[in-house]
Amino acid sequence: MGIQWSINVLLFLLVCAQFSCNSTPIESQTSKVTSANIDLEQFKILLKDLYVLEGMYYRNELKSFHPDTFNALQLEVFDKHNITKKEFRQAYQYFHQKPELIDEVYQEMINEFEIEREKKKDTVDYSTIKQD
Protein backbone atom coordinates (compact mmCIF):
# COMPACT_ATOMS: atom_id res chain seq x y z
CA MET A 1 0.00 0.00 0.00
CA GLY A 2 2.87 2.41 0.74
CA ILE A 3 4.37 2.33 -2.74
CA GLN A 4 0.90 2.53 -4.33
CA TRP A 5 0.09 5.55 -2.17
CA SER A 6 3.37 7.17 -3.18
CA ILE A 7 2.59 6.53 -6.84
CA ASN A 8 -0.87 8.07 -6.42
CA VAL A 9 0.63 11.16 -4.77
CA LEU A 10 3.18 11.49 -7.57
CA LEU A 11 0.47 11.16 -10.21
CA PHE A 12 -1.55 13.85 -8.48
CA LEU A 13 1.48 16.14 -8.32
CA LEU A 14 2.23 15.43 -11.97
CA VAL A 15 -1.28 16.49 -12.97
CA CYS A 16 -1.04 19.60 -10.77
CA ALA A 17 2.29 20.52 -12.31
CA GLN A 18 0.90 20.06 -15.79
CA PHE A 19 -1.99 22.46 -15.24
CA SER A 20 -0.34 24.99 -12.97
CA CYS A 21 2.74 25.87 -14.99
CA ASN A 22 3.07 28.05 -18.04
CA SER A 23 4.57 26.33 -21.01
CA THR A 24 8.12 27.56 -21.60
CA PRO A 25 10.90 26.23 -23.78
CA ILE A 26 13.15 23.67 -22.14
CA GLU A 27 16.61 24.98 -21.41
CA SER A 28 19.54 22.67 -21.04
CA GLN A 29 18.43 19.81 -18.79
CA THR A 30 21.88 19.42 -17.32
CA SER A 31 22.41 23.07 -16.52
CA LYS A 32 22.51 24.08 -12.89
CA VAL A 33 19.82 26.21 -11.34
CA THR A 34 21.46 29.60 -11.11
CA SER A 35 20.61 30.40 -7.51
CA ALA A 36 20.64 26.89 -6.03
CA ASN A 37 23.27 25.03 -8.09
CA ILE A 38 21.13 21.87 -8.28
CA ASP A 39 20.95 20.06 -11.57
CA LEU A 40 17.96 18.04 -12.76
CA GLU A 41 19.35 14.65 -11.70
CA GLN A 42 20.27 15.90 -8.21
CA PHE A 43 16.82 17.43 -7.87
CA LYS A 44 15.13 14.18 -8.88
CA ILE A 45 17.12 12.10 -6.37
CA LEU A 46 16.48 14.62 -3.58
CA LEU A 47 12.79 14.88 -4.37
CA LYS A 48 12.44 11.10 -4.36
CA ASP A 49 14.13 10.87 -0.94
CA LEU A 50 11.76 13.53 0.41
CA TYR A 51 8.70 11.75 -1.00
CA VAL A 52 9.81 8.46 0.55
CA LEU A 53 10.21 10.20 3.92
CA GLU A 54 6.82 11.85 3.55
CA GLY A 55 5.24 8.54 2.54
CA MET A 56 6.66 6.89 5.65
CA TYR A 57 5.22 9.67 7.76
CA TYR A 58 1.73 9.45 6.25
CA ARG A 59 1.70 5.64 6.48
CA ASN A 60 2.05 6.12 10.24
CA GLU A 61 5.59 4.81 10.35
CA LEU A 62 6.76 8.18 11.67
CA LYS A 63 3.57 9.89 12.89
CA SER A 64 4.33 8.88 16.43
CA PHE A 65 7.25 11.30 16.24
CA HIS A 66 6.84 14.95 17.08
CA PRO A 67 6.56 17.20 13.98
CA ASP A 68 9.94 18.68 14.93
CA THR A 69 11.42 15.20 14.52
CA PHE A 70 9.93 14.96 11.03
CA ASN A 71 11.43 18.36 10.19
CA ALA A 72 14.79 17.19 11.55
CA LEU A 73 14.60 14.11 9.30
CA GLN A 74 13.92 16.39 6.33
CA LEU A 75 17.00 18.41 7.23
CA GLU A 76 19.02 15.17 7.34
CA VAL A 77 17.90 14.48 3.77
CA PHE A 78 19.06 17.96 2.74
CA ASP A 79 22.38 17.43 4.55
CA LYS A 80 22.82 14.07 2.81
CA HIS A 81 22.59 15.90 -0.53
CA ASN A 82 24.68 18.87 0.65
CA ILE A 83 22.00 21.50 0.07
CA THR A 84 19.91 23.77 2.26
CA LYS A 85 16.14 23.88 2.52
CA LYS A 86 16.26 27.32 0.87
CA GLU A 87 18.25 25.96 -2.09
CA PHE A 88 15.74 23.12 -2.44
CA ARG A 89 12.84 25.58 -2.50
CA GLN A 90 14.59 27.63 -5.18
CA ALA A 91 15.21 24.54 -7.29
CA TYR A 92 11.64 23.34 -6.72
CA GLN A 93 10.27 26.66 -7.97
CA TYR A 94 12.68 26.67 -10.91
CA PHE A 95 11.81 23.18 -12.13
CA HIS A 96 8.08 23.65 -11.59
CA GLN A 97 8.19 26.62 -13.96
CA LYS A 98 9.27 24.18 -16.69
CA PRO A 99 6.38 21.73 -17.16
CA GLU A 100 8.20 19.46 -19.57
CA LEU A 101 11.11 19.03 -17.16
CA ILE A 102 9.03 18.45 -14.05
CA ASP A 103 6.73 16.04 -15.92
CA GLU A 104 9.82 14.07 -16.88
CA VAL A 105 11.06 14.06 -13.27
CA TYR A 106 7.73 12.80 -11.92
CA GLN A 107 7.36 10.19 -14.65
CA GLU A 108 10.85 8.82 -13.93
CA MET A 109 10.06 8.72 -10.21
CA ILE A 110 6.79 6.88 -10.84
CA ASN A 111 8.63 4.36 -13.02
CA GLU A 112 11.28 3.85 -10.33
CA PHE A 113 8.63 3.36 -7.62
CA GLU A 114 6.82 0.83 -9.81
CA ILE A 115 10.07 -1.09 -10.41
CA GLU A 116 10.76 -1.11 -6.66
CA ARG A 117 7.21 -2.34 -5.98
CA GLU A 118 7.63 -5.16 -8.50
CA LYS A 119 10.94 -6.15 -6.93
CA LYS A 120 9.27 -6.34 -3.53
CA LYS A 121 6.50 -8.53 -4.97
CA ASP A 122 9.13 -10.87 -6.37
CA THR A 123 10.82 -11.23 -2.97
CA VAL A 124 7.72 -12.31 -1.02
CA ASP A 125 8.14 -15.79 0.48
CA TYR A 126 4.72 -17.30 -0.13
CA SER A 127 5.61 -20.47 1.75
CA THR A 128 5.29 -18.60 5.05
CA ILE A 129 1.70 -17.53 4.34
CA LYS A 130 -0.96 -19.66 6.04
CA GLN A 131 -3.41 -21.27 3.70
CA ASP A 132 -6.95 -22.18 4.75
Image: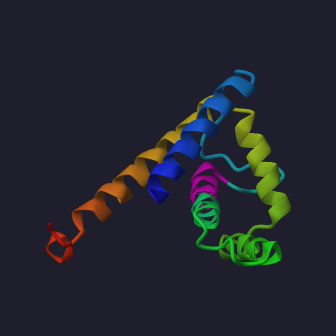
The residue depicted at 61 percent of the width and 58 percent of the height is 51
In the rendered image, the vertical position of residue 63 relative to residue 122, given as above or below: below
Residue 112 is a magenta residue: no
**In the rendered image, which quarter contains the N terminus?**
bottom left
Toward which corner of the image does residue 24 lie, by quadrant? top right
Q: Is residue 115 left or right of residue 68?
A: left
Magenta residues, as a range? 39-48
Q: Name the spot of residue 116 as percent of width and height, x first.
A: 37, 59
Q: Residue at x 77, y 77 (%)?
A: 72
Q: Is residue 109 above or below residue 78?
A: above
State which quarter of the image contains the C terminus: bottom left
Residue 15: x and y in percent read: 61, 30
Q: Image point 66% across, 46% down: which residue?
A: 31
Residue 104: % across, % down = 53, 37
- Which image quadrant is residue 17 in? top right
Residue closer to the observer: 1 or 53: 1
